[in-house]
Amino acid sequence: MSVFEDLESEVRSYCRNWPVVFDTAKGSRLTDVDGNTYLDFFGGAGALNYGHNPEALKKPLLDYMARDGITHGLDMYTVAKGEFLHTFQDKILAPRGLDYKVQFPGPTGANAVESALKLARKISGKEAMINFTNAFHGMTLGALSVTGNSMKRTGAGIPLVHATPMPFDNYFDGKFPDFMWFEKLLDDSGSGLNEPAAVIVETVQGEGGLNPARIEWLQGLDALCKRKGILLICDDVQMGIGRTGPFFSFEIAGIKPDIVCISKSISGYGLPMALVLIKPEHDVWGPGEHNGTFRGNNPAFVTATAAIHEYWNDDTLEKSTLAKGERVEEAFNRIAHDTTNTEMFGKGRGLARGLQFENAELGEKVAAEAFQRRLLVETAGPSDEVLKVLCPLTTTDDELDEGLSIIAESVRAATGS
């Protein structure tokens, strides 16, 4: 591993917690160069919802490459892009009654967020944004301005302006009515709040600690934005593509955001790809007004199309994800009940699940114990106090039980219970 320590930047992070050299991966398992196999409850930070190298996606990708299909296409018209757009419209948007234009920004979630913020300002003619406590939207300057984590914000090196945080759902433990502070500031001409162009929200805060917004809170936010003429942006980069059950995480609330940001698992294969979904009346971009060299990653279009055909022709995957999520919830509740020397509780939705520890240090200790037992799992939350489970949605029941058993053992080891 010396080559990484000698040549790679100190910014590297995940590899510090998992100091082995990985070589191959299949389904929910990775194998290192020494032949050791690890169960993956990390899932590429949400980029591998269908697991590693799924066969139904690999063959179309290899066939496409073998026939010298376009690899890099900027925003040129290609067969691969056209097939993806047709499939996305027919299988995803139309059945859900959603009417969106599709923008291909640069291939990352942060770029999708940057596009959404720029577009909202162009539509409204206003500069200010509203974000929420404990939000995470990316590491570029615009995305950081609407991100809550102080460590990540500090990395910007400059003041992050034009965004005002509001309390996320249950921030005050239910002691105050939803949006009391937000609506009061909007209505008070002396509040000093700049009139916002848009509100950006995650329906479940991933990096912020697996904090799920209640359905009624999301519906209330949508209604408030409509009343006040504020655009609603849903950041579905990590929680979309089935992570919470439905294809889009906001479906559960029956809302239709003005702009939606998608990335991570949209390609289905871990290939870089991002979308910005825009209600047609808001598609006011001029040609090239937001672009990027790698917005035409055609191999990603191929695997994204194959993934939709394979996993979204019916509701089988959605039902399976919800059922597996309930099993994780039950296991976390059982672990919390059986651990008598420290407080913890389960949280999340679908297969975006967290186990939050009262003693913040335990989150990383449990994750380290899990790695010793060959389970990859990360932490989340402002102080890494939440053990975060983002296993592939295709993880088998036996693999799920195996991983949950390892987590239970790791909690016992870390707490001495």
Image (cartoon, rainbow, N blue to C red):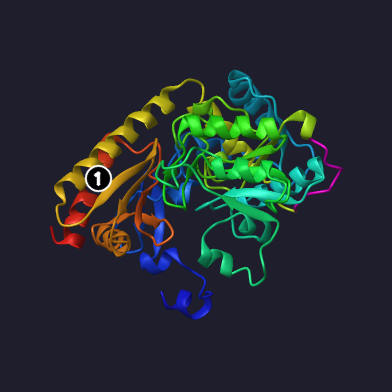
Q: Is residue 112 left or right of residue 181?
A: right
Residue 4: percent from the left, percent from the top? 47, 74
Q: Which of the pair 60/392 is nearer the observer?
A: 392
Q: Is residue 34 left or right of residue 81?
A: left
Q: Residues within 10 Å of mark 1 (few under 14, many from 20)?
A: many
Region in magenta: 283-292
The correct choice, above or below, for 66 with respect to 252 in the image is below
The part of the image, by quadrant, that contains residue 367 is bottom left
The correct choice, above or below, for 362 with respect to 71 in the image is below
Residue 102: percent from the left, percent from the top? 71, 35
Check the picture and name the quadrant holding the N terminus: bottom left
State the predominant SS element of the stretch in magenta. loop
Q: Residue at x 58, y 65 (%)?
A: 153
Check the picture and name the quadrant holding the C terminus: bottom left
**Can residue 74 be seen?**
no
Residue 342: percent from the left, percent from the top? 20, 56
Q: Which residue is mark 1?
A: 404
Q: Which of the pair 104/159 is nearer the observer?
A: 159
